[in-house]
Amino acid sequence: MRKALIAAATAAIAIAVALAPGASLKTLAEPSEFTDGNATYTLTDDASAVILTGWDPADTSEEITLSETATDGTETYDVIGIGDNVFSGISTLKTITIPATIASIGDGALAGENLTTVNMQSSAAPSIGTDVFNESATVNVPAESTGYDAEAWAAVNVVPAASEGDDTTDPATDPTDPSEGDDTTKPEVTGTVADFVERLYTVALGRPSDPLGKADWVDRAEKQGYTGADLAHGFLFSPEFLDKNLETSDFLDILYRTFFDREADKDGKDDWTGRMADGWTKQDVINGFIGSDEWAALCASYGIESGRDQISSDGSSDKITAFAARLYSTCLGRTPDANGLADWANKLRSQTVTGTEVARGFFFSPEFLDAHYSDGEFVTRLYRTFLGRTPDTAGFNDWVGRLADGATREDVFYGFANSVEFNLICKDYGILR
């Protein structure tokens, strides 16, 4: 259904462009607009999808990744196009990632004066207007893409990613290559994050996904830094799964299918059965599966981090480490450094600090403060950290308005930290709020 909606809306845009080459991306006689975070969206004629038609320059960092979906607070829509000149006047933006749902890009849409790196996630080139990019821009596209060599792209510096097996460096001499001469290659990415989530529904819960639940898990992986291990935990410790009250044998069968994509071998299953009889918890056993090479390879085939590096030294509290790693992503927007991650995780594990105290350490750290984020970006990161989602328009405007009226950022921080949602997140990760 989703593909059909995208195809229908894409066709409408393609017709508009074909009728008037270089024309603006306008699909409504009477536009219906809404904002979601920094972005303004316009509904297509049949209200099945939206086009990104505006962006708040005051809330723009040097690097952004556009969302595949947008919500007006009630409905969630696929974002299938970028309108004319959306980012052309934003000087702070240097790098932008365009999701695979984008089927058309309007005139001058990505022509910001400092916007010199554009990362395309679609292997099929979208239709584009005129003067779309900065003259100095490099457009990075997936390997084995199609359509980027068309006439419309002739003036653009398109750089395809190296194809699998393309040996551009010598591992034996390249100091940045961790394999040190190992000629093994990364598993080919054959599925998407959405496919990965659908697989968890099928294998772990034994049913197809529901649209809202699936969209939420995909959002957590793509926008909030959840790893494959985080997602697996969410399913295997969900009330729906726990209510199955599985016997040890059935539980292990599901773990083998979930983490190894195969049926259990007798020797391996007997070993895990013995460990559980000796007192190993389900959490301990799951950690063992997460730490395996088979799980790492399976996650890599879907383009998602496995989370195996978040397992603590005793193998018993990887969710706590995952909570700390999540803060690096949702608050600081980067991957964790090993020493910092271990330090925060150990403090949480020993219960010398709470989840709120650790989050405060991130949001009021010199690194965060030195970034000088706008009120809008500050609130957006609070939503992702404490509520596990992007902001709704009404809530976003309310919190930004409070800051404009004199509330301190610390006041707003504790407003989020004391929420029911964050209390549930802390419980899910097994830490004190």
Image (cartoon, rainbow, N blue to C red):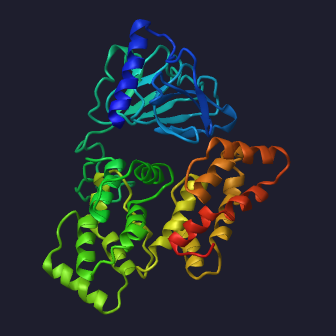
Give left or right: position of 264 versus 331.
left
Across and down, in percent, residue 305 comes to 38, 57
Regarding residue 55, the answer to whether it shows in the image is yes
Question: Residue extending furthest top?
Answer: 20
Regarding residue 171, the answer to whether it shows in the image is no
Q: Quadrant of residue 396?
A: top right
Question: Residue extending furthest bottom?
Answer: 278
Across and down, in percent, residue 406 comes to 85, 49
Q: Quadrant of residue 366?
A: bottom right
Of residue 40 and residue 378, the one placed in the foreground of this image is 40
Of residue 83 and residue 315, the one placed in the foreground of this image is 83
Query: What is the count of numbered marks?
Result: 0
Question: Residue extending furthest left?
Answer: 266
Across and down, in percent, residue 394 comes to 67, 43
Q: Quick one: quadrant of the C terminus?
A: bottom right
Q: Measuring 57% from the left and 61% from the top, which residue is drawn there?
A: 327
Of residue 407 and residue 185, the one placed in the foreground of this image is 407
Q: Is residue 50 above or below residue 261?
A: above
Q: Measuring 38% from the left and 17% from the top, which residue is drawn there?
A: 14
Q: Quick one: quadrant of the N terminus?
A: top left
Q: Is residue 97 above or below residue 199?
A: above
Q: Quadrant of residue 364?
A: bottom right
Across and down, in percent, residue 311 comes to 42, 73
Give left or right: position of 352 versus 341.
right
